[in-house]
Image (cartoon, rainbow, N blue to C red):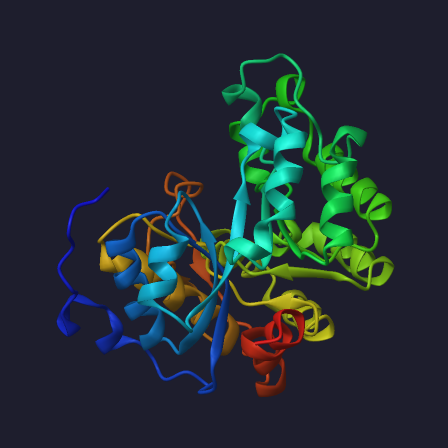
């Protein structure tokens, strides 16, 4: 993906028609990825039109030096520990890499425990997030004060259509495994991706319990389609939840710089700002949601969060957690 991408023109974006939002302060995007450097330029530009001043960038490949040279003050960096390493049990190597993370410029560790790794690893046995084999790695994160951004599970829709329980296990089992990990590694600072993997309305009660039991736990709001789809199903309950736990939630899009399609980035920022800031009802998601494209689509029902809550989500929580 080393092709050169032209800079997007102003009329290439959808921003000319975006509504007036209620928040005009700085935004920290706590969940982004870089795969292609040229596409990252587009991602940065579109993010800035939506107020993004700084971001947490998960680095795929050996590009951190180039990114730091191009954007010296734009990002804090997360080192990616893939399922190949984690669920495949290559823990000694992971510990070695974790010990030198800071020297390489990384502040955060990104870990990935999606069920699909079971089909990618050439073994019949994969490690769960609470397996004792992983304890030395989590101990390393604790001892070196390294925050962990972690993917622990996937949407309910995936378990209904992609993950047969007899092969992958159930979502409840995967959530319980991470809960066990939190108890074993209670001094590790966790940021769970994708709203704790529990934006589904019926799962918010369990996420609330996690917040009460673990004061070091945060969640982020990526990905835009999953979060918007689920929280929009009951905007009143969702608004109450986000307001109550607004000091534990970080704004994030899960944008991945691997395409020069401007609408990809624009749609995700637009969707989330509509969700958090407006009272809009039954607004079509501004991009295709593969999980609902054959069942009527996904629609946004805005939560119209108050300004003090938006300030926490968009900036203050990240400022506290990552010392911006």
**Residue 147 horizontal side relative to residue 286, left or right:** right
Residue 64: give x, y in percent of width and height: 41, 54
Residue depicted at x 34% and y 49%: 288
In the depicted structure, whether residue 297 falls above or below residue 67: above
Q: Nearer the viewer, residue 250 or 89?
A: 89
Q: Position of residue 249 (x, y in %)?
A: 64, 67
Tell me: residue 67, above or below residue 127. below
- Residue at 77% across, 37% down: 136
Q: State whether residue 97 appears in this view.
A: yes
217 in relation to 10, above or below:
above
Specify the quadrant of the image occupied by residue 172: top right
Along the horizontal axis of the image, is 294 left or right of 160?
Answer: left
Q: Is residue 227 left or right of residue 36?
A: right
Residue 155, percent from left and from top? 57, 42
Image quadrant containing the N terminus: top left
State whether residue 92 is above or below residue 214: above
Residue 29: x and y, percent? 48, 67
For the point 72% across and 58% down, which residue is it? 145
Q: Is residue 194 visible?
A: no
């Amino acid at each position: 993906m080393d092709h050169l991408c032209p800079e997007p023109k102003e009329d290439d974006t959808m921003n000319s028609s975006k509504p007036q939002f209620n928040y005009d302060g700085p935004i920290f995007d706590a969940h982004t990825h870089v795969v292609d450097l040229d596409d990252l330029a587009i991602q940065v530009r579109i993010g800035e039109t939506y107020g993004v001043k700084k971001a947490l960038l998960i680095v795929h490949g050996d590009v951190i030096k180039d990114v730091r040279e191009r954007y010296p003050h734009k990002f804090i960096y997360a080192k990616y520990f893939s399922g190949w390493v984690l669920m495949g049990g290559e823990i000694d190597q992971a510990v070695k890499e974790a010990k030198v993370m800071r020297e390489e410029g990384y502040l955060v560790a990104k870990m990935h425990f999606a069920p699909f790794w079971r089909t990618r690893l050439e073994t019949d046995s994969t490690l769960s997030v609470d397996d004792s084999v992983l304890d030395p790695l989590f101990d390393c994160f604790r001892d070196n004060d390294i925050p962990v951004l972690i993917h622990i599970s996937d949407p309910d829709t995936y378990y209904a259509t992609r993950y047969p329980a007899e092969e992958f296990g159930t979502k409840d089992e995967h959530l319980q495994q991470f809960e066990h990990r939190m108890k074993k590694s209670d001094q590790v600072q966790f940021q769970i991706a994708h709203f704790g993997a529990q934006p589904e309305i019926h799962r918010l009660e369990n996420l609330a319990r996690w917040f009460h039991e673990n004061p070091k736990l945060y969640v982020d709001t990526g990905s835009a389609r999953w979060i918007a789809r689920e929280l929009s199903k009951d905007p009143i309950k969702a608004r109450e939840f986000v307001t109550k736990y607004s000091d534990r939630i970080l704004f994030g899009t899960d944008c991945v710089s691997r395409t020069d399609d401007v609408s990809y980035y624009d749609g995700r920022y637009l969707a989330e700002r509509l969700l958090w800031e407006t009272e809009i009802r039954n607004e079509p998601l501004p991009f295709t949601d593969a999980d609902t494209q054959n069942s009527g689509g996904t629609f946004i029902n805005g939560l119209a969060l108050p300004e003090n809550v938006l300030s926490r989500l968009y900036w203050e929580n990240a400022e506290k957690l990552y010392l911006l």
